[in-house]
Image (cartoon, rainbow, N blue to C red):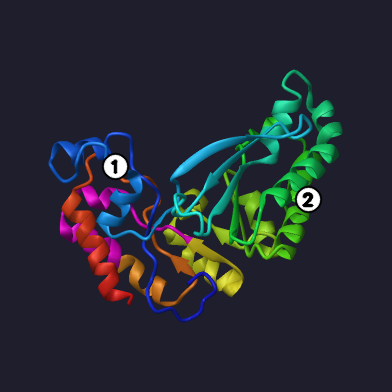
C-alpha cells in the first residue's frame, strides 16, 4: 500500500485504545474480563496494532536510553515491526540537563554518531520503518545553527537505514518548517500520524508537491466511532478517493476514545474490507 502498488486486501490498522475503552466494552459484555489486547484487535477486525508495546533498552552512557516500540502484532515473533525511537533533542537534554546551548551543541556530533549506530544495531530484516519521536523544542531554546544540525542528523540517519533495507523514515513532534525541507529532499518519506503533521486536509497538497516520494498513515477521526453510523460513513467516504490513489494506510489518528461504540468499530472494519478488497 505505502509503495503505491496494487494490493489484494487493504490492511486495517489502529493506534490502540484510551485507558478506559476496553474496561467500558468489558462492562457492556462485549469482552470477557482480562481479554488480551491482541485478541481484541482481531475480534474487532483489525490486522495491525501500531502502538501495542513500549519498552526501554539500556544503551551506553553516550546515548542514554532508547525508547523502543514494536508494531504491529508484537506478540508474533515473525511479524514485522516498526522501530520507534526518542529523538535527538531528547538525548541532548538528557546529556546536558544543566548545560547551556553551547554545551549541548558541543556534544551534538558525539550523540549523533552514537544514536545512529545504536539504531542501526537494533534494526533487522523485520523492520520496514523507523519513526522518530522528536521533542518539540521551543524556538527560544535552539539557535539557528542547532536547528540546522537537527536537520543534518535526519539526513545522516536516512542513509544507513536505507542501506539496511528500511524503506520508511518518519518524524513526529517537529514543526512543519523543520519537516518540509526533509520531505522535499527525500530524507523523510512517511507522514505518520497525519493529524500530527497538519491533518488530512493537506494531503492532496502534499501529493501534488511530493508525488510518490512520500507515503502516509492515519487521517481518520477516531471520535467518529462515538457517534452514529452516518458519522463513520462520512469518515470512510472522506478517505475513499485518497486511499484509492495509493500510498496511504488509513487508520484512526489517535487511540479509540472511551466512548467509542463497539458496533461502530465493527461496522467500520466490515465496510473497509468490502470497499478495499
What residue occupies the far left of the structure in this picture?
29
Instruction: Kindly identify the residue that appears in the image at 15 percent across and 36 percent down.
Output: 27
On screen, residue 211 versus residue 228, left or right, reads right
Among numbered discs 1 and 2, the one appearing first in the sequence: 2
> Which quarter of the rendered picture does the C terminus lie within?
bottom left
101 inside magenta stretch: no
Rendered location of residue 129, percent (x, y)? 59, 58
The answer to which image quadrant residue 63 occupies is top right
- Residue 152 numbered mark, or none: 2
On screen, residue 241 versus residue 94, left or right, reads left
Instruction: Kindly identify the residue that appears in the image at 51 percent across and 69 percent down.
Output: 2
The answer to which image quadrant residue 142 occupies is top right
Instruction: Kindly identify the residue that appears in the image at 24 percent across and 68 percent down.
Output: 271
Q: Is residue 77 above or below residue 275?
A: above
Q: Is residue 110 above or below residue 203?
A: above
What residue occupies the far top of the structure in this picture?
98
What are the residue bounds of the magenta stretch?
217-236
- Residue 257 numbered mark, or none: 1
Amino acid at each position: 500500500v505505502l509503495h503505491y502498488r496494487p494490493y489484494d486486501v487493504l490492511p486495517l490498522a489502529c493506534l490502540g485504545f484510551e485507558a478506559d475503552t476496553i474496561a467500558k466494552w468489558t462492562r457492556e459484555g462485549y469482552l470477557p474480563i482480562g481479554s488480551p489486547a491482541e485478541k481484541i484487535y482481531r475480534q474487532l477486525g483489525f490486522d495491525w496494532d501500531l502502538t501495542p508495546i513500549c519498552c526501554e533498552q539500556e544503551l551506553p552512557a553516550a546515548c542514554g536510553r532508547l525508547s523502543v516500540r514494536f508494531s504491529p502484532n508484537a506478540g508474533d515473533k515473525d511479524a514485522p515491526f516498526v522501530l520507534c525511537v526518542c529523538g535527538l533533542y531528547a538525548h541532548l537534554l538528557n546529556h546536558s540537563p544543566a548545560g547551556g546551548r553551547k554545551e549541548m551543541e558541543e556534544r551534538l556530533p558525539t550523540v549523533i554518531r552514537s544514536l545512529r549506530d545504536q539504531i542501526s544495531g537494533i534494526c533487522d530484516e523485520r523492520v520496514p520503518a523507523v519513526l522518530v519521536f522528536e521533542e518539540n523544542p521551543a524556538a527560544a531554546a535552539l539557535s539557528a545553527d542547532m536547528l540546522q544540525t537537527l536537520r543534518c542528523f535526519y539526513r545522516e540517519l536516512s542513509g544507513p537505514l536505507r542501506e539496511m533495507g528500511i524503506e520508511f523514515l518518519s518524524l513526529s513532534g517537529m514543526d512543519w518548517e523543520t519537516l518540509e525541507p526533509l520531505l522535499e529532499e527525500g530524507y523523510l518519506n512517511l507522514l505518520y500520524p497525519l493529524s500530527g503533521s497538519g491533518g488530512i486536509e493537506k494531503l492532496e497538497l502534499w501529493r501534488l508537491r511530493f508525488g510518490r516520494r512520500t507515503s502516509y498513515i492515519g487521517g481518520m477521526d477516531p471520535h467518529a466511532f462515538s457517534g452514529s453510523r452516518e458519522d463513520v460513513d462520512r469518515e470512510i467516504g472522506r478517505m475513499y478517493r485518497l486511499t484509492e490513489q495509493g500510498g496511504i494506510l488509513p487508520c484512526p489518528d489517535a487511540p479509540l476514545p472511551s466512548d467509542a461504540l463497539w458496533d461502530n468499530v465493527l461496522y467500520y472494519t466490515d465496510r473497509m474490507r468490502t470497499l478495499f478488497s
